[in-house]
Image: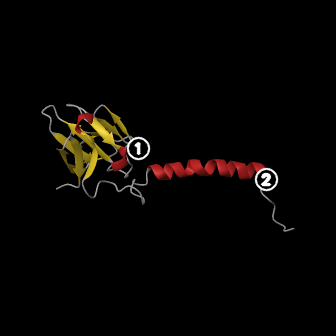
Amino acid sequence: MSGRPSASRRTVLRGAALTPVAGLGLAACSGGSGGGTPATPTAPVVLGAGSEVSKGGAELYLEHNVVVSRAEDGSLKAFSSVCTHAGCAINELRGTTLVCPCHGSEFDAGTGKVLRAPATVPLPELSVEEKNGDIVAGPAA
Protein backbone atom coordinates (compact mmCIF):
# COMPACT_ATOMS: atom_id res chain seq x y z
CA MET A 1 0.00 0.00 0.00
CA SER A 2 1.29 3.50 -0.82
CA GLY A 3 2.04 6.19 1.73
CA ARG A 4 -0.60 8.55 0.33
CA PRO A 5 -3.86 8.89 2.26
CA SER A 6 -6.92 7.83 0.31
CA ALA A 7 -9.88 10.15 -0.16
CA SER A 8 -12.78 9.52 2.13
CA ARG A 9 -16.14 8.53 0.71
CA ARG A 10 -17.52 11.92 1.80
CA THR A 11 -14.78 13.82 -0.06
CA VAL A 12 -15.40 11.86 -3.26
CA LEU A 13 -19.18 12.35 -3.08
CA ARG A 14 -18.84 16.07 -2.33
CA GLY A 15 -16.56 16.51 -5.35
CA ALA A 16 -18.94 14.59 -7.60
CA ALA A 17 -21.90 16.68 -6.43
CA LEU A 18 -20.12 20.00 -7.05
CA THR A 19 -18.72 19.19 -10.48
CA PRO A 20 -21.98 19.55 -12.47
CA VAL A 21 -22.84 22.79 -10.66
CA ALA A 22 -19.51 24.35 -11.53
CA GLY A 23 -19.98 23.40 -15.17
CA LEU A 24 -23.37 25.12 -15.39
CA GLY A 25 -21.90 28.58 -14.93
CA LEU A 26 -19.45 28.04 -17.75
CA ALA A 27 -22.07 26.69 -20.12
CA ALA A 28 -24.42 29.61 -19.51
CA CYS A 29 -21.83 32.16 -20.63
CA SER A 30 -20.13 30.17 -23.35
CA GLY A 31 -21.66 32.09 -26.23
CA GLY A 32 -24.16 29.52 -27.36
CA SER A 33 -22.07 28.61 -30.38
CA GLY A 34 -19.89 25.89 -28.89
CA GLY A 35 -20.17 23.22 -31.52
CA GLY A 36 -23.96 22.87 -31.74
CA THR A 37 -26.31 25.60 -32.90
CA PRO A 38 -24.63 28.61 -34.49
CA ALA A 39 -25.12 31.97 -32.75
CA THR A 40 -27.45 33.05 -35.57
CA PRO A 41 -28.73 31.36 -38.72
CA THR A 42 -26.09 31.09 -41.44
CA ALA A 43 -28.76 30.37 -44.06
CA PRO A 44 -32.52 31.04 -44.21
CA VAL A 45 -34.47 28.90 -41.71
CA VAL A 46 -38.20 28.39 -41.26
CA LEU A 47 -38.98 29.40 -37.69
CA GLY A 48 -42.69 28.71 -37.54
CA ALA A 49 -46.10 29.84 -38.67
CA GLY A 50 -46.61 33.55 -39.26
CA SER A 51 -49.60 33.40 -36.93
CA GLU A 52 -47.25 32.69 -33.98
CA VAL A 53 -46.23 36.36 -33.83
CA SER A 54 -49.15 38.68 -33.18
CA LYS A 55 -49.21 42.41 -33.95
CA GLY A 56 -47.33 44.23 -31.21
CA GLY A 57 -45.88 40.93 -29.98
CA ALA A 58 -42.72 38.88 -30.23
CA GLU A 59 -41.69 35.23 -30.28
CA LEU A 60 -38.39 33.70 -29.18
CA TYR A 61 -37.08 30.78 -31.25
CA LEU A 62 -34.53 29.22 -28.91
CA GLU A 63 -33.35 26.49 -31.27
CA HIS A 64 -32.17 29.12 -33.78
CA ASN A 65 -31.18 31.94 -31.36
CA VAL A 66 -33.63 34.32 -33.04
CA VAL A 67 -36.35 36.64 -31.78
CA VAL A 68 -39.04 37.89 -34.17
CA SER A 69 -41.40 40.79 -33.50
CA ARG A 70 -44.37 42.08 -35.46
CA ALA A 71 -45.18 45.80 -35.50
CA GLU A 72 -48.76 47.08 -35.38
CA ASP A 73 -48.61 47.56 -39.17
CA GLY A 74 -47.85 43.83 -39.57
CA SER A 75 -44.17 44.20 -40.55
CA LEU A 76 -41.65 41.76 -39.08
CA LYS A 77 -38.24 42.34 -37.52
CA ALA A 78 -35.77 39.66 -36.45
CA PHE A 79 -32.69 39.83 -34.27
CA SER A 80 -30.08 37.45 -32.93
CA SER A 81 -31.01 36.42 -29.39
CA VAL A 82 -27.39 36.03 -28.31
CA CYS A 83 -26.46 38.71 -25.77
CA THR A 84 -23.89 41.21 -27.02
CA HIS A 85 -22.34 41.51 -23.55
CA ALA A 86 -20.93 38.03 -22.92
CA GLY A 87 -22.37 35.90 -25.73
CA CYS A 88 -25.00 34.11 -23.65
CA ALA A 89 -28.02 32.65 -25.41
CA ILE A 90 -31.06 34.58 -24.23
CA ASN A 91 -33.81 32.23 -23.12
CA GLU A 92 -36.45 34.54 -21.66
CA LEU A 93 -38.93 36.85 -23.34
CA ARG A 94 -41.17 39.00 -21.11
CA GLY A 95 -43.71 40.58 -23.45
CA THR A 96 -41.34 42.20 -25.93
CA THR A 97 -38.32 42.40 -23.60
CA LEU A 98 -35.52 39.85 -23.89
CA VAL A 99 -33.77 39.06 -20.60
CA CYS A 100 -30.29 37.55 -20.58
CA PRO A 101 -29.84 34.81 -17.95
CA CYS A 102 -26.14 35.49 -17.37
CA HIS A 103 -25.87 39.09 -16.24
CA GLY A 104 -29.39 40.54 -16.60
CA SER A 105 -29.01 42.61 -19.76
CA GLU A 106 -32.34 43.45 -21.38
CA PHE A 107 -33.16 44.17 -25.01
CA ASP A 108 -36.21 45.43 -26.92
CA ALA A 109 -37.38 42.64 -29.25
CA GLY A 110 -38.84 45.20 -31.67
CA THR A 111 -35.69 47.26 -32.14
CA GLY A 112 -32.82 45.18 -30.75
CA LYS A 113 -31.83 48.15 -28.55
CA VAL A 114 -30.35 47.69 -25.10
CA LEU A 115 -32.85 48.48 -22.33
CA ARG A 116 -30.65 47.46 -19.39
CA ALA A 117 -26.88 47.12 -18.98
CA PRO A 118 -24.35 45.58 -18.72
CA ALA A 119 -24.78 45.13 -22.50
CA THR A 120 -24.10 48.34 -24.45
CA VAL A 121 -24.36 47.09 -28.05
CA PRO A 122 -27.75 46.37 -29.67
CA LEU A 123 -28.65 42.91 -30.97
CA PRO A 124 -27.67 42.24 -34.60
CA GLU A 125 -30.61 42.47 -37.00
CA LEU A 126 -31.39 39.53 -39.29
CA SER A 127 -33.35 39.33 -42.49
CA VAL A 128 -36.92 38.08 -42.04
CA GLU A 129 -39.96 37.55 -44.24
CA GLU A 130 -43.21 35.69 -44.30
CA LYS A 131 -43.27 33.04 -47.04
CA ASN A 132 -46.25 30.77 -47.68
CA GLY A 133 -47.53 31.47 -44.16
CA ASP A 134 -44.20 30.72 -42.46
CA ILE A 135 -41.66 33.06 -40.88
CA VAL A 136 -38.27 32.67 -42.51
CA ALA A 137 -35.18 34.35 -41.03
CA GLY A 138 -31.57 34.35 -42.09
CA PRO A 139 -28.35 36.29 -42.08
CA ALA A 140 -28.62 40.06 -42.57
CA ALA A 141 -28.96 40.91 -46.23
- 103 and 79: which is toward the camera: 79
Instruction: Give amino acid for label 2.
Output: Ser
Q: Which residue is mark 2?
A: 8
Query: Who's the residue at 45% across and 49% down the image?
Result: 28
Q: Is residue 81 visible?
A: no
Q: Secondary structure at mark 1?
A: loop
Position in image of residue 1 (x %, y %): 87, 68
| Above-or-below relation of 76 to 4 | above
Observer-side mark, 1 or 2, equals 2
| Above-or-below relation of 92 to 43 | above
Which residue is the extreme one toward the left?
73
- 87 and 91: which is toward the camera: 91
Position in image of residue 38 (x %, y %): 35, 56
Rendering quarter of residue 58: top left
Left or right of residue 62: residue 6:
right
Q: Residue 78's mark?
A: none
N-term mark: 1 or 2:
2
Q: Secondary structure at mark 2?
A: loop
Q: Is residue 108 visible?
A: yes
Q: Which residue is mark 1?
A: 103
Q: Disc 1 to disc 2, how far (Cα)?
A: 37 Å
Q: Mark 1 Cα within 10 Å, few/some/many (few <14, many 20+)?
A: some
Q: Mark 2 Cα within 10 Å, few/some/many (few <14, many 20+)?
A: few
| Above-or-below relation of 56 to 78 | above
Quadrant where the C terminus sits is: bottom left
